[in-house]
Amino acid sequence: MPEGPMPRDAETVAATYATDVLVLGAGSAGCVVAARLSEDAGTQVALIEAGPAAWNEPWIRIPAGFARLYASGKYDWRFHTEAEPGLDGRSIHWPRGKVVGGSGAVNGLVFLRGSPRDYDRWAQSGARGWAHDDVLPFFQRMETWDGPASEGRGTDGPIHAAEARHVSTGAKAFIDSAIAMGYPRVKDFNGPWHEGAGPMQMNVKGGRRSHSADMFLRPARRRANLNIMPGRGIRRLLFEGTRCIGALVKGPAGLERWEARREVVLCAGAIGTPQILMLSGIGDGAHLAEMGIPVLHHSRGVGRNLQDHFLQRMRYRTKPCGTVNELWNAPLGKLQMAARYAWDRRGPMSIGAAEANLFARVLPGAEEPDMQYLFVNFTVTTYDVGPDAHPGFMFSACQCRPDSRGSITLRSPDPDAKPVIRASYLDAPHDQRLMVEGVKYARRLAAQAPLAALIEEELTPGPRAATDEEILAHVRRDGGTVYHPCGTARMGEDDLAPVDPLLRVKGVERLRVADASVMPLIPSSNIQPAVLMIGERAAALLRGAARGG
Ligand SMILES: Cc1cc2nc3c(=O)[nH]c(=O)nc-3n(C[C@H](O)[C@H](O)[C@H](O)COP(=O)(O)OP(=O)(O)OC[C@H]3O[C@@H](n4cnc5c(N)ncnc54)[C@H](O)[C@@H]3O)c2cc1C
């Protein structure tokens, strides 16, 4: 039996399994990869996942359930960043899905691809073959757009997308105020140009979450050639020389050895993937030596290039105008919301993280939108606590393309130890300026009719954040994440890129990465559609390779 590079696990292997392709991590991308590959009856596929399968969890299906899952910590890895120097030393909670479906099962359902230019920038950065024209067919393949016919949209893919089924008084006012500022009402945020305002697009089918576990994996799970193995933590990859031959996995009855005859595909997400690579001896040699891990391949870029969207919430106390705060705090309000959702899958419970959207240019001279505003019809200080007691809504000012870069490193060679996450928010002067201008811009929006007539008071940042310095100080104290970490095993042609544009890990054979970590640059909006596209593309590459392509 082949051996790994280092006999670091003292326990003995309880069982050995073999398959053709081993997919590690059943998240947004992993479910797509496993489902697509298993369409070929002749390919044996095994999909390994740390979390449980939760096929019938109602809070995953109900869009508003994302807030409940967040607050409960159910299906969450419960990661936190280190104390962030740019945020006055605050550590930020980074939820990550630990369930079949991964973060796509617990996310806010905002379904936006970003700008076509984002992918042209990927190609320019060295991800050859990932320009917008190259990736468009894969965006189309994974989706069905349940809206009016629109250029570049998919019509028969598994993931369904539609405009929000509920647009509140506040959301309408938000959109109309943006139009009053000169923005167009965007017909399709996933069309060729996305600047402007409109109701949010969400990955929903008939008002229920439409995600890769449900739409790709569920229909595939009875296939004889697909093994879905939840409740199994990946310890490290196994190699014969530099050829990846499988993974060592902690199963319910002890260590399991999973061998892959053809390829291993790492889909453990922007935190799990670099962690597993490093635990397996692929990473910065000096860092691995520090951890006592023998170096299989010195790859300085593993865990670097971490990017995330940072946000500042503009919270408003409003006149009564049907906000979720009012319903939440009314005697029968929760029942009313539940009844409405049960009746026709509409109303506030049909909404995830946002009801309306605006892509705006806030920095002087910006050639394309640099700030995304996400409107929600309630106020919270954080999602850990419920809506505030007074009527209110908020919109978040989210950076489209931050310059700051963070890192993931190991805390210890123990696979159960959480890695060290340094997001480095607001490290780059551009990001600081963007947030200050983003807040000022949001205030101009809030001062426009019809929004202005609904707003009684700006709660955060509030009147004490008046000058640029005060606004920045507030953002450091109060800003947070949009939950989009990516880029930690980026693809590219330069030496620092750990993965090549065919998603192959450099320096070893038969190992690919397919998840948010391969993104060279963060897209301008919420990133899950891009992750699903990567999953589709990875499956096509693997099938092509199997055919000798
Ligand atoms: C709270 C929240 C809200 C979000 N809102 C939105 C949104 O509205 N719109 C949007 O586009 N994006 C959103 N995102 C981001 C988006 O969901 C993620 O970027 C995307 O799902 C990442 O996909 P992935 O396949 O790279 O990783 P994941 O989906 O995280 O999958 C990785 C999988 O690997 C498994 N795994 C990791 N390590 C191991 C291990 N050692 N052993 C076994 N299994 C392992 C994990 O359990 C997980 O299932 C949100 C994310 C969160 C957390």
Image (cartoon, rainbow, N blue to C red):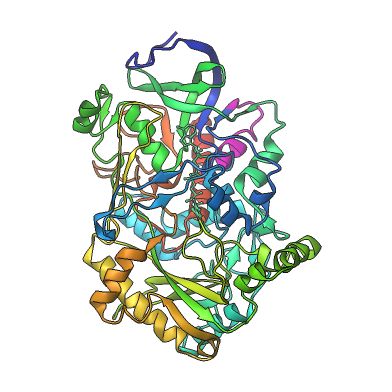
**Residue 273 in view (yes/no):** yes
Q: Quadrant of residue 326?
A: bottom right
Q: Is residue 233 left or right of residue 337?
A: left
**Front in this rendered view, residue 376 or 129:** 376
**Front in this rendered view, residue 68 or 299:** 68
Pick out the residue farthest to the top.
Answer: 1
Residue 260: x percent and y percent? 50, 22
Q: Residue at x 34, y 53 (%)?
A: 307
Q: Does the magenta run of residues contain 200? A: no
* Span colored in magenta: 31-45
**Residue 148 in view (yes/no):** no
Q: Is residue 531 above or below residue 49?
A: below
How many numbered badges does the structure rendering display? 0
Q: Is residue 197 above or below residue 511?
A: below
**Front in this rendered view, residue 170 or 33:** 170
Residue 30: x percent and y percent? 53, 39
Quadrant of the image containing the N terminus: top left
Q: Is residue 284 left or right of residue 204?
A: left
Residue 89: x percent and y percent? 27, 55
Residue 340: x percent and y percent? 76, 66
Q: Residue at x 62, y 43 (%)?
A: 213
